[in-house]
Image: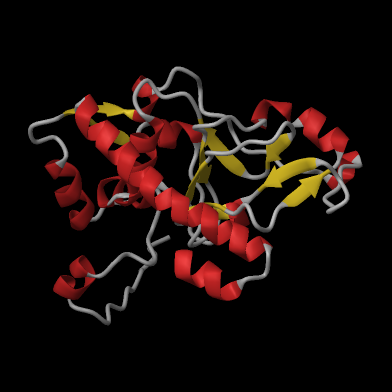
Amino acid sequence: GREIVMVRVDKTLKEMMEEKPASRWDPAYWHPVFEKILSQISKGFEVLPLEDILKEPIIAPDHVRASKGEKIDKGFSCEYRTLKDLLFTGLNYAEINYCSENAQKRLKRTQLKVGDILFAGSGVGAVGRLGLVEHVSLKSCVGDLFIIRNPKISFYYVYVYLLTEFGQSQIEKIFHGISSAKISTKEIEQIKVVLVNDAIQQQVKSEYKKMSKYHDKAMEAKKNNNEAEYKKNI
């Protein structure tokens, strides 16, 4: 009844504190680097949890289920968005998966709208990957991604903010799981967002849309198998 635990440490405390955490013991992960970053965002700005700036609840993930007779195939008409569609510069419009009508009907709550922010909530190296929806089709649904919808402030700003060091460090701090990384709706809702004035939000939107024109050109080139034009624009 008197167990002994031995822990071998191959690095100095300084090395452990400075490295980007790649493994951890959960729950309630803590790291000084995160605390330092998070302390900066409360200086001079109002800060609110994400749930307080959303008009609608976050839509939780689901996916096409073969057990229900649902299928993924190029011959169907409903766009099916998954992790592979989340490129750093926007959604992948060049290589689209499609799913069956019965899947789209069951997953109709995930029909995409302009301004939706897609958020990967599981998988090592995938948690915190994001996509912003700027183009929608009449029929679409989402597989295994959260949807952050209808914020009270600019969705361009919320999206870009979540990609910054402030957003990504919080995501890395709160996701859990040792063998399979995951994050919950409640945890996403508690991500702290720095509120900046409307002029700054509009500037973020303007700069994003400049970038996004090149993304769209790259996707068009990819669709047409023009690798040189794709690389030039992406």
The number of callouts visible is 0
- The front one of 58 and 176 is 58
Q: Which residue is rendered at x = 42% and y = 36% of the image?
A: 187
Residue drawn at (48%, 44%), measured in percent from left and top? 183
Q: Is residue 30 left or right of residue 77?
A: left
Residue 87 in view (yes/no): no
Above or below, comparing residue 107 to residue 66 in the picture:
above
Residue in view at x 39 percent, y 52 percent: 211
Residue placed most toward the observer, 166 or 216: 216
Residue farthest toward the left in the current orientation of the protein: 44
The N terminus, quarter of image: bottom left
Residue 177: horizontal and vertical position, in percent?
49, 53
Quarter of the figure with residue 79: top right
Q: In this view of the protein, can residue 17 be seen by the observer? A: yes
Q: Is residue 222 above or below residue 92?
A: below
Which residue corresponds to the image point at 52% horizontal and 46% vertical from the top-left?
A: 121
Is residue 210 rendered to the left or right of residue 36? right
